[in-house]
Image (spheres, rainbow, N blue to C red):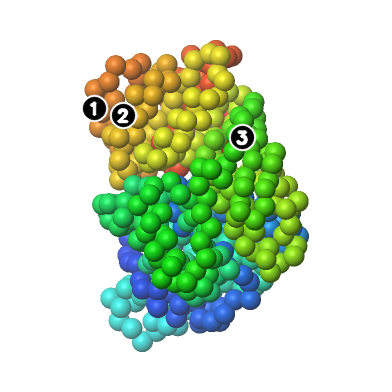
Amino acid sequence: MQKVSFKQAEEYILSIPKFAGKHTLEDTKRFLSVLAGKKTESKVIHVAGTNGKGSVCAYLRSILMKSGCSVGVFTSPHLESMRERICLGEEMISEEDFADTFYKVKRVWKALTREADEEERKRLHPSFFEYLFLMAMVYFKEKAPDYIILETGLGGRLDATNIFEKPAVCVITEIGFDHMQYLGNTIEEIAKEKAGIIKEGVPVVFADKRPKVTEILGEYAKSAKSQTIIIGKDSILDVNIHNKTIDFSFHSGYYKYDGLCLMTTALYQTENSALAIAAAEVLGREDQRIRPESIREGVRCACWPGRMEEVLPGVFLDGAHNEDGIEAFLQTVCRDGCTGQRFLLFGVVADKQYEGMIRQIVNSGVFARVAVAPLESDRSVSIDRLREIWGQYKIHCSFHQNAEEAYHHLAKAKAKADVIYIAGSLYLIGQMKTLMRRISDD
Protein backbone atom coordinates (compact mmCIF):
# COMPACT_ATOMS: atom_id res chain seq x y z
CA MET A 1 0.00 0.00 0.00
CA GLN A 2 1.44 3.37 -1.04
CA LYS A 3 2.02 6.02 1.61
CA VAL A 4 0.20 9.33 1.28
CA SER A 5 0.83 13.03 2.01
CA PHE A 6 -0.71 14.90 4.94
CA LYS A 7 -3.18 16.58 2.59
CA GLN A 8 -4.27 13.26 1.11
CA ALA A 9 -4.66 11.75 4.60
CA GLU A 10 -6.71 14.74 5.74
CA GLU A 11 -8.99 14.57 2.69
CA TYR A 12 -9.54 10.85 3.20
CA ILE A 13 -10.50 11.30 6.87
CA LEU A 14 -12.90 14.12 5.99
CA SER A 15 -14.62 11.75 3.56
CA ILE A 16 -15.14 9.01 6.17
CA PRO A 17 -18.62 10.07 7.43
CA LYS A 18 -19.95 9.21 3.98
CA PHE A 19 -19.38 5.50 4.45
CA ALA A 20 -18.42 4.57 8.03
CA GLY A 21 -20.49 4.00 11.13
CA LYS A 22 -19.79 3.82 14.83
CA HIS A 23 -18.47 0.52 16.19
CA THR A 24 -18.52 -1.22 19.55
CA LEU A 25 -15.81 -0.68 22.15
CA GLU A 26 -14.73 -4.26 21.57
CA ASP A 27 -14.20 -3.46 17.88
CA THR A 28 -12.02 -0.49 18.86
CA LYS A 29 -10.05 -2.54 21.42
CA ARG A 30 -9.42 -5.29 18.87
CA PHE A 31 -8.30 -2.79 16.24
CA LEU A 32 -6.01 -1.01 18.69
CA SER A 33 -4.47 -4.23 19.98
CA VAL A 34 -3.33 -5.04 16.44
CA LEU A 35 -2.09 -1.50 15.89
CA ALA A 36 -0.29 -0.75 19.14
CA GLY A 37 -0.49 -3.73 21.46
CA LYS A 38 -2.95 -4.35 24.25
CA LYS A 39 -1.34 -2.16 26.90
CA THR A 40 0.01 1.36 27.10
CA GLU A 41 2.74 2.22 29.57
CA SER A 42 1.43 5.79 29.85
CA LYS A 43 -1.05 6.71 32.56
CA VAL A 44 -4.41 7.69 31.07
CA ILE A 45 -6.53 10.64 32.24
CA HIS A 46 -10.06 10.43 30.86
CA VAL A 47 -12.20 13.59 30.52
CA ALA A 48 -15.93 13.69 29.69
CA GLY A 49 -18.70 16.27 30.07
CA THR A 50 -20.79 18.72 28.08
CA ASN A 51 -18.86 21.98 28.44
CA GLY A 52 -15.28 22.64 29.46
CA LYS A 53 -13.64 19.33 28.48
CA GLY A 54 -11.01 20.92 26.27
CA SER A 55 -10.22 23.58 28.86
CA VAL A 56 -9.73 20.96 31.58
CA CYS A 57 -7.40 19.06 29.25
CA ALA A 58 -5.43 22.25 28.60
CA TYR A 59 -5.05 23.03 32.32
CA LEU A 60 -4.03 19.45 33.07
CA ARG A 61 -1.49 19.46 30.25
CA SER A 62 0.04 22.69 31.53
CA ILE A 63 0.20 21.40 35.13
CA LEU A 64 1.86 18.15 34.06
CA MET A 65 4.37 19.92 31.85
CA LYS A 66 5.28 22.35 34.65
CA SER A 67 5.78 19.26 36.83
CA GLY A 68 8.35 17.93 34.40
CA CYS A 69 6.10 15.23 32.93
CA SER A 70 5.69 14.41 29.25
CA VAL A 71 2.09 14.31 28.09
CA GLY A 72 0.11 13.32 25.03
CA VAL A 73 -3.27 14.99 24.46
CA PHE A 74 -6.16 13.89 22.27
CA THR A 75 -8.99 16.44 21.97
CA SER A 76 -11.84 17.41 19.67
CA PRO A 77 -13.02 19.23 17.72
CA HIS A 78 -10.24 21.21 16.06
CA LEU A 79 -10.54 24.88 15.19
CA GLU A 80 -8.27 25.27 12.15
CA SER A 81 -6.15 22.16 11.60
CA MET A 82 -7.00 18.50 12.14
CA ARG A 83 -3.50 18.15 13.62
CA GLU A 84 -4.68 20.11 16.71
CA ARG A 85 -6.44 16.97 17.91
CA ILE A 86 -3.19 15.05 18.53
CA CYS A 87 -0.51 16.83 20.54
CA LEU A 88 2.66 15.93 22.39
CA GLY A 89 2.97 18.62 25.01
CA GLU A 90 1.88 21.80 23.26
CA GLU A 91 3.14 20.66 19.85
CA MET A 92 0.69 19.41 17.26
CA ILE A 93 1.56 16.18 15.52
CA SER A 94 3.69 16.99 12.47
CA GLU A 95 2.30 16.59 8.97
CA GLU A 96 4.78 13.79 8.38
CA ASP A 97 3.78 11.89 11.54
CA PHE A 98 0.10 12.50 10.80
CA ALA A 99 0.48 10.92 7.36
CA ASP A 100 2.56 8.07 8.80
CA THR A 101 0.06 7.15 11.54
CA PHE A 102 -2.80 7.49 9.04
CA TYR A 103 -1.01 4.95 6.83
CA LYS A 104 -0.54 2.52 9.72
CA VAL A 105 -4.23 2.62 10.65
CA LYS A 106 -5.35 2.12 7.07
CA ARG A 107 -2.88 -0.73 6.57
CA VAL A 108 -4.27 -2.58 9.60
CA TRP A 109 -7.85 -2.01 8.42
CA LYS A 110 -6.96 -3.51 5.05
CA ALA A 111 -5.27 -6.50 6.72
CA LEU A 112 -8.23 -7.13 9.04
CA THR A 113 -10.75 -6.97 6.19
CA ARG A 114 -8.75 -8.77 3.52
CA GLU A 115 -11.19 -11.67 3.34
CA ALA A 116 -14.34 -9.55 3.83
CA ASP A 117 -16.75 -8.51 1.11
CA GLU A 118 -17.24 -4.83 0.23
CA GLU A 119 -20.20 -4.33 2.54
CA GLU A 120 -18.35 -5.84 5.51
CA ARG A 121 -15.24 -3.77 4.73
CA LYS A 122 -17.29 -0.59 4.91
CA ARG A 123 -18.94 -1.69 8.14
CA LEU A 124 -15.60 -2.36 9.78
CA HIS A 125 -14.02 0.89 8.65
CA PRO A 126 -13.29 3.22 11.60
CA SER A 127 -15.51 6.30 11.84
CA PHE A 128 -14.07 9.81 11.55
CA PHE A 129 -13.53 10.10 15.32
CA GLU A 130 -12.36 6.50 15.73
CA TYR A 131 -9.79 6.87 12.96
CA LEU A 132 -8.24 9.94 14.60
CA PHE A 133 -8.30 8.30 18.03
CA LEU A 134 -6.51 5.22 16.67
CA MET A 135 -3.94 7.46 15.01
CA ALA A 136 -3.41 9.28 18.31
CA MET A 137 -2.84 6.05 20.20
CA VAL A 138 -0.32 4.82 17.61
CA TYR A 139 1.51 8.14 17.88
CA PHE A 140 1.50 8.09 21.71
CA LYS A 141 2.66 4.47 21.72
CA GLU A 142 5.72 5.54 19.74
CA LYS A 143 6.40 8.68 21.80
CA ALA A 144 5.68 7.01 25.18
CA PRO A 145 4.66 10.09 27.21
CA ASP A 146 4.25 9.79 31.00
CA TYR A 147 0.55 10.66 30.71
CA ILE A 148 -2.11 10.57 28.00
CA ILE A 149 -5.09 12.92 28.34
CA LEU A 150 -8.13 11.69 26.40
CA GLU A 151 -11.17 13.88 25.77
CA THR A 152 -14.34 12.03 24.83
CA GLY A 153 -16.02 12.98 21.57
CA LEU A 154 -19.54 12.97 22.98
CA GLY A 155 -21.20 10.96 25.69
CA GLY A 156 -18.79 8.64 27.45
CA ARG A 157 -20.20 5.15 27.90
CA LEU A 158 -19.90 4.22 24.21
CA ASP A 159 -17.18 6.67 23.23
CA ALA A 160 -14.18 5.21 21.42
CA THR A 161 -11.87 6.63 24.10
CA ASN A 162 -13.63 4.56 26.77
CA ILE A 163 -11.57 1.41 26.26
CA PHE A 164 -9.12 1.67 29.15
CA GLU A 165 -10.11 -0.38 32.19
CA LYS A 166 -7.84 1.41 34.66
CA PRO A 167 -7.18 5.09 33.88
CA ALA A 168 -5.31 7.04 36.55
CA VAL A 169 -8.24 9.42 37.11
CA CYS A 170 -11.54 10.31 35.45
CA VAL A 171 -12.86 13.87 35.19
CA ILE A 172 -16.44 14.83 34.35
CA THR A 173 -17.03 18.50 33.59
CA GLU A 174 -20.32 20.38 33.66
CA ILE A 175 -23.16 18.30 32.21
CA GLY A 176 -25.94 20.04 30.31
CA PHE A 177 -28.27 19.68 27.34
CA ASP A 178 -26.36 18.95 24.14
CA HIS A 179 -26.27 16.14 21.55
CA MET A 180 -29.66 14.96 22.80
CA GLN A 181 -30.27 13.03 19.58
CA TYR A 182 -27.50 10.67 20.75
CA LEU A 183 -27.49 10.95 24.55
CA GLY A 184 -31.11 11.34 25.62
CA ASN A 185 -33.66 14.08 26.18
CA THR A 186 -33.35 14.44 29.95
CA ILE A 187 -30.44 15.56 32.09
CA GLU A 188 -30.60 12.20 33.88
CA GLU A 189 -30.17 10.26 30.63
CA ILE A 190 -27.27 12.47 29.55
CA ALA A 191 -25.58 12.18 32.96
CA LYS A 192 -25.77 8.38 32.81
CA GLU A 193 -24.02 8.38 29.43
CA LYS A 194 -21.25 10.64 30.76
CA ALA A 195 -20.97 8.53 33.94
CA GLY A 196 -20.10 5.58 31.72
CA ILE A 197 -16.41 6.55 31.92
CA ILE A 198 -16.31 5.82 35.68
CA LYS A 199 -14.22 2.71 36.30
CA GLU A 200 -13.97 0.42 39.30
CA GLY A 201 -11.65 1.83 41.93
CA VAL A 202 -10.61 4.82 39.79
CA PRO A 203 -11.01 8.26 41.45
CA VAL A 204 -13.48 10.54 39.69
CA VAL A 205 -13.52 14.34 39.83
CA PHE A 206 -16.68 16.20 38.88
CA ALA A 207 -18.48 19.52 39.28
CA ASP A 208 -21.53 19.89 41.53
CA LYS A 209 -23.70 22.06 39.26
CA ARG A 210 -27.03 20.22 39.09
CA PRO A 211 -28.33 18.17 42.06
CA LYS A 212 -29.71 15.38 39.85
CA VAL A 213 -26.40 15.07 38.00
CA THR A 214 -24.42 15.01 41.24
CA GLU A 215 -26.70 12.29 42.59
CA ILE A 216 -26.32 10.12 39.48
CA LEU A 217 -22.54 10.51 39.28
CA GLY A 218 -22.28 9.78 42.99
CA GLU A 219 -24.34 6.59 42.62
CA TYR A 220 -22.21 5.36 39.72
CA ALA A 221 -19.01 6.09 41.64
CA LYS A 222 -20.31 4.34 44.75
CA SER A 223 -21.27 1.28 42.70
CA ALA A 224 -17.76 1.25 41.20
CA LYS A 225 -16.15 1.78 44.63
CA SER A 226 -14.51 4.90 43.25
CA GLN A 227 -13.50 7.87 45.34
CA THR A 228 -15.33 11.07 44.42
CA ILE A 229 -13.77 14.52 44.49
CA ILE A 230 -16.60 17.01 44.06
CA ILE A 231 -16.02 20.64 43.09
CA GLY A 232 -18.83 22.79 44.45
CA LYS A 233 -19.55 26.50 44.61
CA ASP A 234 -18.00 26.68 48.06
CA SER A 235 -14.72 25.31 46.66
CA ILE A 236 -14.03 28.42 44.55
CA LEU A 237 -13.69 31.67 46.49
CA ASP A 238 -12.56 35.30 46.23
CA VAL A 239 -13.01 35.59 42.47
CA ASN A 240 -11.76 38.86 40.98
CA ILE A 241 -11.75 39.64 37.25
CA HIS A 242 -9.09 42.09 36.10
CA ASN A 243 -8.28 43.54 32.69
CA LYS A 244 -6.63 40.38 31.33
CA THR A 245 -6.66 37.93 34.24
CA ILE A 246 -8.75 36.30 36.97
CA ASP A 247 -7.59 35.82 40.56
CA PHE A 248 -9.33 33.31 42.84
CA SER A 249 -8.80 30.84 45.64
CA PHE A 250 -9.55 27.13 45.55
CA HIS A 251 -10.06 24.76 48.47
CA SER A 252 -9.61 21.23 47.23
CA GLY A 253 -10.09 19.38 50.49
CA TYR A 254 -6.41 18.43 50.44
CA TYR A 255 -4.81 21.81 49.95
CA LYS A 256 -5.79 25.47 50.01
CA TYR A 257 -4.67 27.46 46.97
CA ASP A 258 -4.90 31.19 47.65
CA GLY A 259 -4.21 33.79 44.99
CA LEU A 260 -4.43 31.55 41.93
CA CYS A 261 -4.14 33.45 38.65
CA LEU A 262 -5.61 32.54 35.25
CA MET A 263 -4.53 34.31 32.07
CA THR A 264 -8.11 34.82 30.91
CA THR A 265 -11.22 36.85 31.72
CA ALA A 266 -13.53 33.84 31.20
CA LEU A 267 -15.26 33.38 34.54
CA TYR A 268 -16.15 29.75 33.74
CA GLN A 269 -12.47 28.85 33.64
CA THR A 270 -12.26 29.02 37.44
CA GLU A 271 -14.33 25.84 37.59
CA ASN A 272 -12.47 24.12 34.76
CA SER A 273 -9.07 24.91 36.28
CA ALA A 274 -10.34 23.70 39.69
CA LEU A 275 -11.34 20.36 38.15
CA ALA A 276 -7.85 20.07 36.64
CA ILE A 277 -6.20 20.94 39.96
CA ALA A 278 -8.21 18.28 41.80
CA ALA A 279 -7.31 15.68 39.15
CA ALA A 280 -3.64 16.67 39.36
CA GLU A 281 -3.74 16.18 43.13
CA VAL A 282 -4.97 12.62 42.58
CA LEU A 283 -2.04 12.00 40.23
CA GLY A 284 0.30 13.62 42.73
CA ARG A 285 -0.41 10.92 45.30
CA GLU A 286 1.81 8.59 43.27
CA ASP A 287 3.88 11.07 41.26
CA GLN A 288 5.95 13.28 43.54
CA ARG A 289 6.82 15.57 40.65
CA ILE A 290 3.30 17.02 40.83
CA ARG A 291 3.44 19.55 43.66
CA PRO A 292 1.36 22.59 44.67
CA GLU A 293 3.97 24.91 43.14
CA SER A 294 3.78 23.26 39.71
CA ILE A 295 -0.01 23.12 39.92
CA ARG A 296 -0.17 26.85 40.64
CA GLU A 297 2.25 27.67 37.82
CA GLY A 298 0.50 25.27 35.45
CA VAL A 299 -2.91 26.91 35.69
CA ARG A 300 -1.34 30.36 35.39
CA CYS A 301 0.42 29.51 32.13
CA ALA A 302 -2.36 27.47 30.51
CA CYS A 303 -4.07 28.66 27.36
CA TRP A 304 -6.93 27.13 25.39
CA PRO A 305 -7.74 28.91 22.10
CA GLY A 306 -11.23 30.18 21.38
CA ARG A 307 -12.32 30.57 24.99
CA MET A 308 -12.75 34.29 25.62
CA GLU A 309 -9.64 34.75 23.49
CA GLU A 310 -8.72 38.31 22.54
CA VAL A 311 -7.52 37.99 18.95
CA LEU A 312 -7.39 41.71 18.16
CA PRO A 313 -7.74 44.69 20.52
CA GLY A 314 -11.35 44.65 21.70
CA VAL A 315 -12.25 41.51 19.68
CA PHE A 316 -12.96 38.30 21.60
CA LEU A 317 -13.71 34.75 20.43
CA ASP A 318 -15.65 32.39 22.67
CA GLY A 319 -16.60 28.79 21.92
CA ALA A 320 -20.03 28.92 23.61
CA HIS A 321 -22.19 26.64 21.44
CA ASN A 322 -25.11 25.47 23.61
CA GLU A 323 -27.43 26.99 26.20
CA ASP A 324 -25.17 26.32 29.19
CA GLY A 325 -22.20 27.65 27.27
CA ILE A 326 -24.07 30.82 26.31
CA GLU A 327 -25.10 31.33 29.94
CA ALA A 328 -21.46 31.08 31.08
CA PHE A 329 -20.38 33.35 28.21
CA LEU A 330 -22.93 36.01 29.18
CA GLN A 331 -21.87 35.91 32.83
CA THR A 332 -18.35 36.83 31.77
CA VAL A 333 -19.48 39.49 29.27
CA CYS A 334 -21.56 41.22 31.95
CA ARG A 335 -18.43 41.63 34.08
CA ASP A 336 -16.02 42.73 31.35
CA GLY A 337 -15.79 46.40 32.39
CA CYS A 338 -16.63 47.61 28.87
CA THR A 339 -17.05 51.42 28.83
CA GLY A 340 -18.45 51.53 25.30
CA GLN A 341 -20.93 49.33 23.48
CA ARG A 342 -20.84 45.57 23.04
CA PHE A 343 -21.39 43.96 19.64
CA LEU A 344 -21.96 40.27 18.87
CA LEU A 345 -21.23 38.21 15.75
CA PHE A 346 -23.37 35.06 15.92
CA GLY A 347 -23.54 31.84 13.92
CA VAL A 348 -24.75 28.39 14.91
CA VAL A 349 -25.19 24.82 13.66
CA ALA A 350 -28.64 23.36 13.12
CA ASP A 351 -28.43 20.50 15.65
CA LYS A 352 -28.10 22.88 18.62
CA GLN A 353 -30.91 24.43 20.65
CA TYR A 354 -30.29 27.68 18.88
CA GLU A 355 -33.69 29.24 19.59
CA GLY A 356 -32.98 29.04 23.30
CA MET A 357 -29.44 30.37 22.78
CA ILE A 358 -30.78 33.37 20.87
CA ARG A 359 -33.43 34.01 23.53
CA GLN A 360 -30.75 34.06 26.24
CA ILE A 361 -28.66 36.55 24.28
CA VAL A 362 -31.57 38.89 23.66
CA ASN A 363 -32.85 38.69 27.24
CA SER A 364 -29.40 39.53 28.62
CA GLY A 365 -29.65 42.97 27.07
CA VAL A 366 -25.86 43.33 26.95
CA PHE A 367 -25.38 43.75 23.18
CA ALA A 368 -26.12 47.01 21.38
CA ARG A 369 -26.11 45.29 18.01
CA VAL A 370 -25.80 41.76 16.60
CA ALA A 371 -24.48 40.64 13.21
CA VAL A 372 -25.76 37.20 12.15
CA ALA A 373 -24.25 34.94 9.50
CA PRO A 374 -24.40 31.28 8.41
CA LEU A 375 -21.32 29.10 8.84
CA GLU A 376 -19.12 27.55 6.17
CA SER A 377 -20.58 24.15 7.00
CA ASP A 378 -23.42 22.03 5.71
CA ARG A 379 -24.53 21.79 9.37
CA SER A 380 -25.19 25.54 9.58
CA VAL A 381 -28.57 27.08 10.25
CA SER A 382 -29.63 28.88 7.06
CA ILE A 383 -29.64 32.66 6.88
CA ASP A 384 -33.41 32.59 6.25
CA ARG A 385 -34.02 30.59 9.43
CA LEU A 386 -31.70 32.87 11.41
CA ARG A 387 -33.55 35.90 10.06
CA GLU A 388 -36.86 34.34 11.12
CA ILE A 389 -35.74 33.66 14.72
CA TRP A 390 -33.88 36.91 15.35
CA GLY A 391 -36.70 38.86 13.69
CA GLN A 392 -39.01 37.97 16.59
CA TYR A 393 -37.06 40.29 18.89
CA LYS A 394 -36.56 44.03 19.17
CA ILE A 395 -32.80 44.18 18.86
CA HIS A 396 -30.47 45.94 16.41
CA CYS A 397 -29.68 42.98 14.16
CA SER A 398 -28.11 42.73 10.70
CA PHE A 399 -27.87 39.66 8.47
CA HIS A 400 -24.94 38.71 6.26
CA GLN A 401 -23.98 36.12 3.71
CA ASN A 402 -20.91 34.99 5.64
CA ALA A 403 -19.01 35.61 8.86
CA GLU A 404 -16.28 37.70 7.24
CA GLU A 405 -18.86 40.15 5.90
CA ALA A 406 -20.54 40.25 9.32
CA TYR A 407 -17.25 40.96 11.08
CA HIS A 408 -16.31 43.83 8.79
CA HIS A 409 -19.79 45.32 9.31
CA LEU A 410 -19.24 45.36 13.10
CA ALA A 411 -15.60 46.47 12.84
CA LYS A 412 -16.65 49.48 10.75
CA ALA A 413 -19.13 50.54 13.46
CA LYS A 414 -16.77 49.85 16.38
CA ALA A 415 -15.41 52.78 18.39
CA LYS A 416 -12.24 52.45 20.48
CA ALA A 417 -14.15 51.71 23.71
CA ASP A 418 -16.48 49.18 22.06
CA VAL A 419 -16.00 45.41 22.23
CA ILE A 420 -16.85 42.79 19.59
CA TYR A 421 -17.66 39.27 20.77
CA ILE A 422 -17.89 36.29 18.43
CA ALA A 423 -19.79 33.22 19.69
CA GLY A 424 -22.32 30.51 18.88
CA SER A 425 -20.25 27.72 17.34
CA LEU A 426 -16.74 26.28 17.39
CA TYR A 427 -16.98 26.12 13.59
CA LEU A 428 -17.43 29.90 13.65
CA ILE A 429 -14.46 30.33 15.98
CA GLY A 430 -12.22 28.32 13.66
CA GLN A 431 -13.29 30.40 10.67
CA MET A 432 -12.69 33.65 12.54
CA LYS A 433 -9.26 32.62 13.83
CA THR A 434 -8.18 32.09 10.24
CA LEU A 435 -9.66 35.47 9.25
CA MET A 436 -8.04 37.26 12.19
CA ARG A 437 -4.64 35.83 11.30
CA ARG A 438 -5.08 37.12 7.78
CA ILE A 439 -6.10 40.58 9.06
CA SER A 440 -3.11 40.66 11.41
CA ASP A 441 -0.76 39.77 8.54
CA ASP A 442 -2.09 42.52 6.26
Q: Is residue 275 left or right of residue 215?
A: right
Q: Quadrant of residue 113?
A: bottom left
Vertical arrangement, residue 420 with respect to residue 319, above or below: above
Residue that label 2 marks? 359
Estimate the spatial distance between the alpha carbons at disc 2 and disc 1, rounded to whole Å: 13 Å
Q: Are marks 2 and 1 in contact (CB under 8 Å)?
A: no
Helix, strand or loop at disc 1?
A: helix
Q: Earlier in the sequence, mark 2 or mark 3?
A: 3
Estimate the spatial distance between the alpha carbons at disc 3 and disc 1, rounded to whole Å: 43 Å
Residue found 61% across the figure and 29% down from its top: 241
Q: Position of residue 230 (x, y in %)?
A: 51, 54
Residue that label 3 marks? 238
Residue that label 1 marks? 388
Residue found 53% across the figure and 21% down from its top: 419
Q: Is residue 60 left or right of residue 228?
A: right
Camera sees residue 165: yes
**For the C terminus, which image quadrant?**
top right
Residue found 43% across the figure and 58% down from its top: 153
Helix, strand or loop at disc 2?
A: helix
